[in-house]
Image (tube, helix red, strand yellow):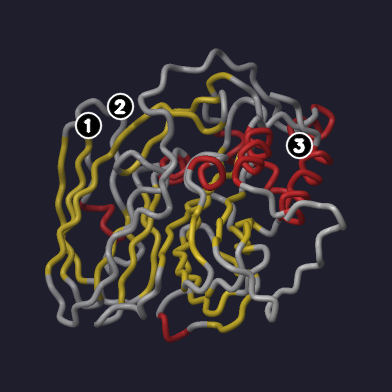
Amino acid sequence: MRTLTIATLAISLLAVVIAGVGLAKWSEAESAIAARQLSPAASASANERIGTSALGPSKQTDVPTVARDPSIMPPQITRTEPTTVEINTTVKELTAEIADGATYDFWTFDGTVPGPLHRVMEGDTVRLTITNPSSSKTPHNIDLHVVNGPGGGAAVTNVAPGETKTFTFTALNEGAYAHHCAFAPPYAHIAQGMYGGIVVEPRGGLPKVDREFYVMQGDWYTAGAFGDKGHQGFSGAKALAEQPEYFTLNGHVAALTSLFPLRANVGETVRVFFGVGGPNIGSNFHVIGEVFDRVYSGASNTFTANEETWYVPPGSVSTFELRLDEPGQYLLVDHALWRVAKGALGVLMVEGAWNPSVYLRPPPPVGASH
């Protein structure tokens, strides 16, 4: 794959936005971006503080990727009475690619980053069981930010390899929340990919929408430089210095572009549960070419209307709702935009007819094909 300088990368992204290219061209552009080969001069100053290590060859992968498809969602709640909800989650320590040609040793809930989105209703009794297979090398647990109790459940769910633990809590507070492994040191477990979300809907459920998506951003600290091929080991020094080499949306630099782009249609209403696993760096979530009709962190009745960019801190999930007016490709970004060059990028593909009363495109040049 060809090497991209930062300038070339920025121009490529701008061209995608302006031209509204088709999926085939987008995949070609994204493949180049995913190569992660920024020029040595551009990345040298960032790496001088800590340095980088030469990588060994890529490891054999357990799965090709831990990237989570953002369209895989639990059904929206329609009931009005609380019930008992069973949640079962299994720790999976896996080697997979974090970028094209670069492998990484992930720790996950149920084999994806983020782990599955859990969905309950306000007032529900939740019985959660966590299993750590005997094949694991490390103890783990789970801390859910929705839990009212010491450790958010972590204190009673420590599971060594081969163990299973169960605890029960009541979902008292409506909203969307993060969960993560909190086994000591918790930041190391989060840094390996052990985070996810849980939504507590109001009685009767949230207002219905046509489509829902689930996205979580993470920052990754690798021994090698951003874009290096081979096996990327974890760098505690870079994590302590808060100097990530990669950012991902859903566990791979191309998760929401060439692997699992979001798809919807003109006229549809969309809800995005967007969270940040971290461990260190929040996200300034923005969809280029759209305005969020409603954004809320916490209960749905606390929403902010007509928001452009919303900060989501590490260890948090916010809810974004919008209606799609025009077809085209809409980029999901962290609006601290240099992070796009390290993987904080997704795409929403919208199909349908143009509405010239909303967005009037200039006519094509004479002789150009439509």
| Dots 2, 1 in contact, CB < 8 A | yes
Quarter of the image with the C terminus is bottom right
**What percent of the width, then of the height, locates residue 151?**
31, 58
**What percent of the width, then of the height, locates residue 150?**
28, 62
Q: Earlier in the sequence, mark 3 or mark 1?
A: 3
Label 3, label 2: how many angstroms apart (C-alpha)? Answer: 33 Å
Label 3, label 1: how many angstroms apart (C-alpha)? Answer: 38 Å
The amino acid marked with disc number 1 is Pro
Give the quadrant of residue 52.
Answer: top right
Q: Is residue 353 left or right of residue 151?
A: right
The residue lying toward the viewer, choosing from 360 and 191, is 360
The amino acid marked with disc number 2 is Lys
Tag of residue 161: 1
Q: Secondary structure at mark 1?
A: loop
Q: Earlier in the sequence, mark 3 or mark 2?
A: 3
Q: Secondary structure at mark 2?
A: loop
Can you identify the residue that label 2 sits on? 137
Residue most extreme to the front = 367
Tag of residue 46: 3
**What percent of the width, then of the height, locates residue 107?**
38, 36
Quarter of the image with the N terminus is top right
Q: Secondary structure at mark 3?
A: helix
Give the quadrant of residue 362.
Answer: bottom right
